[in-house]
Each structure stands twice: as structure tokens, then as C-alpha cells.
Image: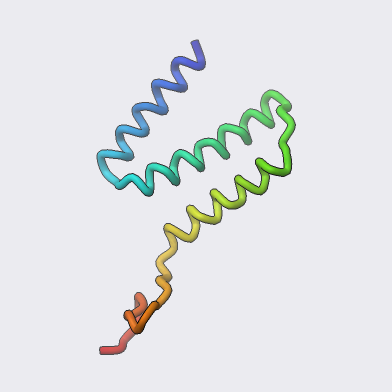
Amino acid sequence: MVLVVLQAGGGLLVAAVMKYTDNVLKGLATGVSVVVGTAFSTVLFKTPLTSQFVIGSFIILLSVYLFNSNALVSYGGEKEVGSNQS
């Protein structure tokens, strides 16, 4: 029963994300949900973590941070955010 409720809640969250954002953010949210779900599973059910999962989790969280940061990298003379150049 708990699994059904969690899957239904996840489906509703995906629908809300897709309504207000884009596919990239949906992919990032899915990755974060896997990391958070596994963290809870580790605490509640003593599930062992592998080094591959820890590295993957780090990459997911880093990608979410970089995607949501305001700093833009300038390529080919494009203006950066906050730049006062004309």
C-alpha cells in the first residue's frame, strides 16, 4: 500500500514539474529524488551503499547545483550575467 501511495505521489509531482518547468529540470528532479529516496532507504532499512552510487549521487547533485547557479560561462565574447559592458 505504501508503494502505491509513493508512486501516485511521484506521478503527481512529475505532472506539476512538467506543467511549470521544462524537461531538463524534470530530469534533474528525478535524479535528486533517487538520491533522496536512497538516503532514506539507507537510514530506515540499513541498505548498504556502493561506491558507484555515492559517485553517481555526487555527480547528480553537482549537476543540479551547476544548472541552478546564476553564473554563466562566457563563450565567444557573449556577455556574462551581471556584466556592465555595453
Q: Position of residue 74 (x, y in %)?
A: 39, 77
Above or below, comparing residue 41 to residue 61 in the picture: above
Look at 34% across and 28% down and name the residue there.
Answer: 12
> Residue extending furthest front?
76
* Quadrant for the C terminus in the image: bottom left
For the point 48% across and 60% down, the residue is 66
The answer to whether residue 83 is above or below residue 63 is below
Residue drawn at the location 45% of the way across and 15% of the way down? 4
Quadrant of residue 8 within the rendered picture: top left
Report whether 55 appears left or right of 81. right
Residue at left offset 33%, top offset 45%? 23
Indicate the position of residue 38 as horizontal and vertical percent values: 61, 33
Which quarter of the picture shows residue 47? Answer: top right
Query: In the orientation shown, which residue stands out farthest toward the bottom?
Result: 86
36 lies above or below 70: above
Q: Total of numbered circles in the picture?
A: 0
Above-or-below relation of 25 to 44: below
Furthest residue toward top: 1
Give the image location of residue 54, x and y in percent.
Answer: 67, 44
| Colour scheme of the picture | rainbow
Could you say where residue 43 lies in the image, as x and y percent from the top left?
68, 31
In this image, 51 relative to 5: left or right? right
